[in-house]
Amino acid sequence: MVNELINRQIVACREQGAAPEDIAAELGINVATVNLVLSAHGLGDRDITDEQLVLLRQNAFELAMQKSDLSVSSRMTQYLIDRDKPRQEQHQTPLIVINNAIQSANEKLAELSKEYSNVVPLQAS
């Protein structure tokens, strides 16, 4: 398993345009691990460019709006509606939930420690 720092480095390198092979070589890890992390963050390799995706979406919209073939029009309309529905909240993996709980507990402990270190003890009279 890759720690959080390595995950962040992989994502940052990819966002700067580095290839997975270069990232793996730089960080001294396996290319498959880099690809796994990139896929988990939605940064994996794509088969089409952004420009091609725009053209395909426009074509899908035009098919949905055409009146000559009602069955194609209705299927494309339904596809476009389903695709653009608000996404349901994604459930986090148990590991992420546990990690978040530990971080929250550590932050709370630090706050409490700071508060108690500033308390002046009462002197008995």
Image: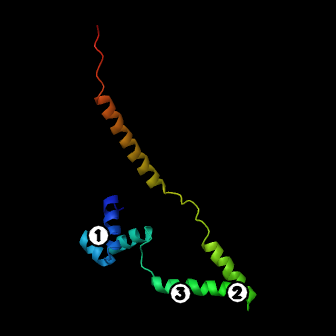
Q: Which residue is mark 1?
A: 29
Seen in the picture, residue 24 relative to 113 is either above or below; the reply is below
* Residue 107 image point, x, y percent: 36, 42
Q: Quadrant of the N terminus?
A: bottom left
Q: Residue at x 34, y 63 (%)?
A: 8
Q: Residue at x 73, y 89 (%)?
A: 67
* Residue 69 image point, x, y percent: 73, 90
Query: Depth check: 4 or 29 in front?
Result: 4
Query: Depth check: 28 or 6 in front?
Result: 6
Seen in the picture, residue 56 relative to 106 is either above or below; the reply is below
Q: Secondary structure at mark 1?
A: loop
Q: Is residue 37 left or right of residue 9?
A: right
Which callout, 2 or 3, points to the residue nearer the camera? 3
Mark 2 or mark 1: whose residue is earlier in sequence: 1
Q: Is residue 45 left or right of residue 71?
A: left
Q: Quadrant of the C terminus?
A: top left
* Residue 94 image point, x, y percent: 48, 53
Which callout, 3 or 1, points to the residue nearer the camera? 3
What is the spatial separation of the Cα atoms under label 3 and label 1, in whole angstroms? 37 Å
Q: Which residue is mark 2?
A: 72
Indicate the amino acid at tag 2.
Answer: Val
Q: Residue at x 57, y 85 (%)?
A: 58
What is the spatial separation of the Cα atoms under label 2 and label 1, in whole angstroms? 48 Å
Query: Visible in this render: residue 59?
Result: yes
Q: Which residue is mark 3?
A: 55
Indicate the amino acid at tag 1.
Answer: Ile
Q: Mark 1 and mark 3 in contact (Cβ < 8 Å)?
A: no
Query: Visible in this render: residue 47?
Result: no
What is the spatial separation of the Cα atoms under label 2 and label 3, in whole angstroms? 18 Å
Number of numbered markers: 3
Seen in the picture, residue 107 relative to 17 is either above or below; the reply is above
Q: Mark 1 and mark 2 in contact (Cβ < 8 Å)?
A: no
